[in-house]
Amino acid sequence: MMQNRVLVEMLQQSIETSSSSLSSSSSERFYNWLLECHGFWHNAFLIIASFLFVFYLALQAKQSYLKLSHGRSYIIISYYLSLWLVSLLNLLWCSSQAWECSSGKVMAWNLLSLFTTSGMLFLEVSLLAFLLQGNNASGLEALTRTFGISGIIVGFDILLKAIYLFAFGIPFFIHSNGGTQHMKWNLWVIHKLLLTAVYGCILFMYHSRWRERLPARPAFYKYVTIMFIFNAIALFACGLAGNGAAFGLWLYSVTVVCYHAFYLPLLYITFLADFFQEEDLHLENVYYSEMKDAGFFEADWD
């Protein structure tokens, strides 16, 4: 009897010890996931912002599906599906911030960041390609041309960053160590410089005699203005960070947070919101009305 009691007590102690160790390890993992690396507010802000946008897409999914099935627009359908995929990938990226500071997760973090940023860049370049095609962008041919151009540009971008990651061993997407790696920041400077130049050229077209070749929507103009200012700030931050300035690294981190938190909602508002909200009129009539209100036909009266 005494031996049985001893065995039972030892079993109870082992169970209590294992449960306490499991609870402590789980609480430690939760602490590391939410609080370490960039801090609580940084991680919580990214997670909440990305989750709210995915939650909004989920709430609108049924209505969006009905609208897409009646609209039969290849560009809108493809863009909406791509937005869903990239939004889920961005939510995973925002929820994995602790990987950036974990030595065993360096490669996983860089690969996740590579695919996430490439997906967002694909959407960004696709919208630019759509803008530059002007009012003739419609149908399957425009979809093939738009996504083909975007695929080539983003594919080259992925290849270049993969060379940095695998050939040179540069942790391209890790900025928490604060080190100055000139090769990495030089590539980021070129990346932001090209985007700033493209948005600047489109802004110039909006204020020139070539503006009638662009889609006549004020929302597109506001989008281009916001992205021009944003990329100019990011370019300035990359230049400072490449020279070892702590303020530049902080400013670049702010632009990264803003990009992952707000870019996809901005893209949705600019390109897709009117399509899903318009009920009574065809979208082309809405674009024509906005074009007329913006003064795009004033030259015809002169």
Image: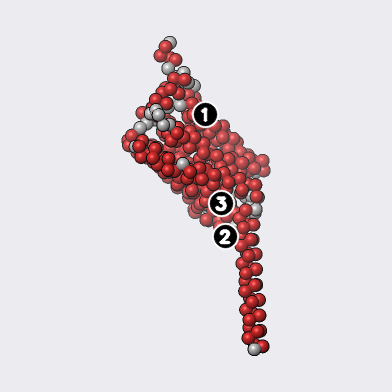
Task: Kindly identify the residue that appears in the image at 47 percent across and 45 percent down.
Answer: 58
Q: Residue at horizontal 47%, vertical 20%? A: 293
Give the distance between the C-alpha atoms of the residues marked 3 and 2, in whole angstroms: 17 Å
The kind of residue on which mark 2 rests is: Gly
Which residue has dot 3 on it? 95
Foreground mark, 2 or 1, reads 1
Mark in front: 3 vs 2: 3
Image coordinates of residue 54 in percent, x first then y, are 50, 45
Query: Of the residues under marks 2 and 1, which one precedes in the sequence?
Result: 2
Q: Which residue is mark 1?
A: 222
Q: Quadrant of the C terminus?
A: top left
Location of mark 2 (residue): 104
The CA span between labels 3 and 1 is: 30 Å
Local SS, label 1: helix
Where residue 130 appears, x then y in whole percent? 41, 33
Measured Cα–Cα span from mark 2 to mark 1: 42 Å
